[in-house]
Image: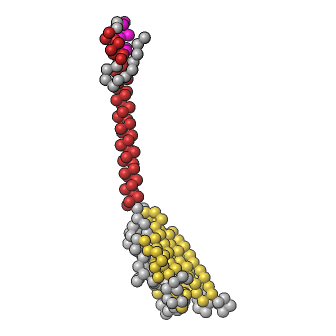
Amino acid sequence: MMSGKDDGNTTDLENHLETQGCFPDMCDLLREFGAVREKLRVMETRMEDSETRLMDTETQILELKNKEKKTVVFSAATGGGNKPIGPFNTDTTLIYRTLITNIGAAYSPSTGVFVAPVAGVYYFTIFFHAGGEHEAKLTLNKNNDLVVMTHDHRSTSDGADNGGNAVFLQLVQGDQVYVRLIAKTHVWGSDVHTTFSGFLVTEM
């Protein structure tokens, strides 16, 4: 009985054929079978090597993407010593001077303006607390355009008001987002009540 164990170079089958007689056609078929089997072994080895290299490349690409991913998160309060901010005679950019978080340093506590460091979709929230003796109205603006607002009317029966709003914005690098305190309105200034926050959801 013939055996065909592959030692990587010369097979037992080939050795058998050299030492034992066989029908010519059968010998040719057996030799062809051995050659095909050797080619398959080489191809399998190459495929395994290719799969390993592909997995390594995918891992490297993923690592690069994670390294390049920009993190932008900020949250700030007006500050102000627990007293009203406003009312003013004109619309005023509200400056949130008390930084809570500012990863990426895209928000400026000196100007009150957030500048998008990368193109992407961002999420912003504004909240206010105010007394009822004056109207309260804040607008969130992108560049020179009003996007959303939060508002409460003056009330003699309601001693305190709270309000807020939120929005997803698609921004390009350099776009500015900020909050305006509308003329003749006010909010309560403290480190915990009136806040402006945002973060990068995804780059584009």
Q: Quadrant of residue 84?
A: bottom right
Q: Residue at x 39, y 57 (%)?
A: 65
Give the dominant element type of the magenta stretch: helix, strand or loop.
helix
Q: Is residue 88 left or right of residue 10?
A: right
Q: Residue at x 47, y 84 (%)?
A: 94
In which quadrant of the rendered image does the C terminus lie?
Answer: bottom left
Q: Residue at x 46, y 75 (%)?
A: 101
User: Residue 114 versus residue 154: which sits nearer the camera?
Assistant: 114
Asked which colour scheme the image uses, the reply is secondary structure
- Tell which residue pokes out farthest to the right in this image: 157
Q: Residue at x 46, y 79 (%)?
A: 99
* In the image, residue 57 above or below residue 13: below
Say whether residue 135 is magenta.
Answer: no
Question: Which span of residues is magenta-colored?
Answer: 22-30
In which quadrant of the rendered image does the N terminus lie?
Answer: top left
* In the image, residue 88 above or below residue 140: below
